[in-house]
Image: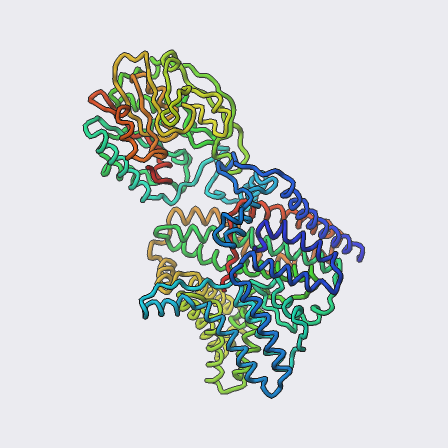
Amino acid sequence: MVFSETPFLFVFLPILLILYYLTPRRAKNYLLLAASLLFYFTGEPRYTFLLIASALGNYLFALAIEGLPRAKKPFLILAVVLNIGTLVFFKFSAVWIGGLNALLGTSFEPFALPLGISFYTFQAMSYTIDVYRGEAKLQKNPFAFATYLCLFPQLIAGPIVRYTDVDEELENRRHTLQGFSEGLARFTVGLSKKVLLANNLGVLCDTFRQAEAPSAAFGWLYAICYALQIYFDFSGYSDMAIGLGRVFGFDFPENFDYPYISGSITEFWRRWHKTLSGWFRDYVYIPLGGSRVSRPRWMLNLLIVWALTGLWHGSGTGVMNFVLWGALYGVLLCLEKLFLGRIFAKFRPLGHLLVIAVTLFGFVLFGADGLAGTLSDLAILFGRSGLTDPAALYYWRSGAVLVLIAIVGATPLPKKCWDLLQRRAEGVTAILQPLLVAAALAISTAYIVDSSFNPFLYFRF
Amino acid sequence: MKTVSTIRHIATAAIFCLFVAFFGIAAWLSPDKEYSVYERRELEQTPSLEEAEELSEYFTAWENYLSDQFYLRDELRFLKSGFAHHVLLQKDVNGYYSEDGIQAELLYPMNTANVISNVALLEEVRQTYFPSCPAYYAVIPDKSYYMDAPLGLDYGEIDGILAKELNASPIPLRDALELSDYYATDIHWKQENLEGVYEALRASLGGDLPSYADAGFAEKTAGDFYGVLYGQAAMPADRDEMRYLTNATIEGLTLQVLDTGKSGAVYDTEAFAGDDAYDLYLGGEAAILHLQNPAADSDRKLILFRDSFGRSIAPLLAQGYSEIVLVDLRWIRPSYLSAFSGLLAADENTDVLFLYSAQVLHSMKLG
């Protein structure tokens, strides 16, 4: 079950909302836990046990770390090894099972990647590490901890919510009309971003993939649409998660802040998937010494972090593309720290151009089928099959308004306009907001009903 | 100010909750439908756990079921098309587009593999069953050919494949048709506009076909209808009017449906009122139909390999033949044709015509 499907929107969500607000305060977490497990079970029945095992395991490790101070380091190491080991086991099963098959002449099938494993594993690790560091209070109630880890709004595609972000709300949270209403409005914004923008951009990307010999014009349309699709898909999901969090009384951290307006790569990663960059900063980069080391070591730290970031996104045999994608950003960040950053500080448009170019090429690498596919896609961008073709012109014309809306939507302009309207004519927004929510829901539902199953891009990371 | 924001919060929350509650309750209360006329397909029914091989398959079936049975599904599909066309200004939606009220399917990119495979199959049929008969082929262009569509089938390539792979004489039809010869909401041609096609076929086929003018066809009206494109494209359009041609010869024709062993009507007005109005012609889809003309002056026979377009022109062609056997290779494998060897028996008085729409050659594999 995903947020942009009829079972969630018209069965799961309304029933849960009714039950949740009828349930006494002390039982709300139990209801959320049960609903979250059901939510996960309907999407990934085979691996629900893994999620429960992760919750139980990390709960016990934290208990041991807190209860046995002298053995807390071995317990932490064991917890990290088991978490990372499980992640690697599933993420790269195609690689190691492929190797095993080649070695033994067997034909074992690789394991499917459990839904959201990269997200919930990182959340669980943040808790265990924070308890070890003394930065998080031990949660003695296993059900409360399981509620945090399995909480369905952010369970399968983030944001990566750390335990410390919600520990107080787990125990005692306020449910207000404002939170409820703003949460639903935010959810609707996210739903529209996913269904109306990301999915439609995805259709244009698919036409590129179906074309026999696409021209450079088609290639650039694909590159632009794919970069926008990923942004609206992922930020749309984050909006839905944050919105649902508010509906149930939680304040999840923001995950996106208009990354495509960034003036440097450093700024881009402060605005893109903020909870992941923050996780790597706090649990990898700073423990490695961060920037408070020698310059070569600093650069190495950056490269390690970004190679790991790439690896986190990858899975299966196409992992090299993601490692290269991460490494590309690592190298650029190093260059920015060394000298580019100073130039971009003086000439922001130059940095902005680099961000756009790197994002476009980076996501071509991200979306290509292996390294050979990347080279082929890049060759198309540079005119291997001609500069233009009738199909490219047709889809440019057909998708122009969508792309334009998406580009404007990726900037803070719409939000600024809304905020201005709210300041100048609050009465108008009191009427306009419900109308816009109704319209967005109706049109998104129309698209959902008309479409076949279409999963979120970020579920398999 | 606080009051204004409270109103906004209450209204937003109420709208959202009412929306999901309304469609949620409607999903439970509205009876399930088995078939969508607009989409021309069976709709998902309540999933059964026993039938699913895996639990995930069962949950996916629920998702499909709820989408298929969604209350106001057809209306919402029209809303989507309207938004895509009028707000996003998309040229096509789900591969369908509309130009001046005429709806069409975007046939791009061409499935060359299907065309090659289908033409090879036709040649195999010709060689197996009619090696020494005069054989002809004609390709019916899809209507977007006349719509100034920027993307579409490559007719040059289709011609090339046919000329190379099918040992039969071509009968060009592209100049014999124009856009107005097709229904606005359907893929098919209008029978009453087939004079050019009739004359093109008459000029090549060996049957004793009278000229179109001499045949003295009279037009009758079957009624208004929405064609297959209307529901698929989900775009507003005016209804088409279906007419049919008749004369004394056509009224004397007899039709046998070999699939059922029953006789049928050349113009089946009951079928017109069904899901697909084009079933007016020869009663709808069937693998083998046998049209006999007791008033024929000669004993010439036509074996017509065809798709649905062939059903509307067959009664007109029957003017020049004592019998026409219509074979639809979408519904029967070539190897099964041997079971109809008597019906398909051919001699020097037999013409074999492969009459296919380019859309069928591109979009499916025959046989």
Identify the residue at horizontal 58%, vertical 53% (top origin). Answer: A4
Residue B344 at x, y percent in the picture: 27, 25
Residue B216 at x, y percent in the picture: 37, 13
Residue B291 at x, y percent in the picture: 34, 20
In the image, residue A407 sits, relative to residue B102, either above or below, namely: below
> Which residue is at the front of the view, A103 or B159?
A103
Query: Residue A66's image quarter?
Result: bottom right
In the image, residue B302 sits, relative to residue A445, either above or below, namely: above
Compared across the picture, whether B349 is left or right of A245 comes to left
Compared across the picture, whether B197 is left or right of B54 comes to left
Query: Residue B170's image quarter?
Result: top left
Compared across the picture, whether A430 is left or right of B205 comes to right
> Which residue is at the front of the view, A175 or B235?
A175
In the image, residue A101 sits, relative to residue A403, either above or below, namely: below
Q: Is residue A272 visible?
A: no
Extreme front residue here? B50
Residue A381 at x, y percent in the picture: 39, 59
> Which residue is at the front of the view, B283 or B145?
B283
Identify the residue at horizontal 58%, vertical 39% (top origin). Answer: B32
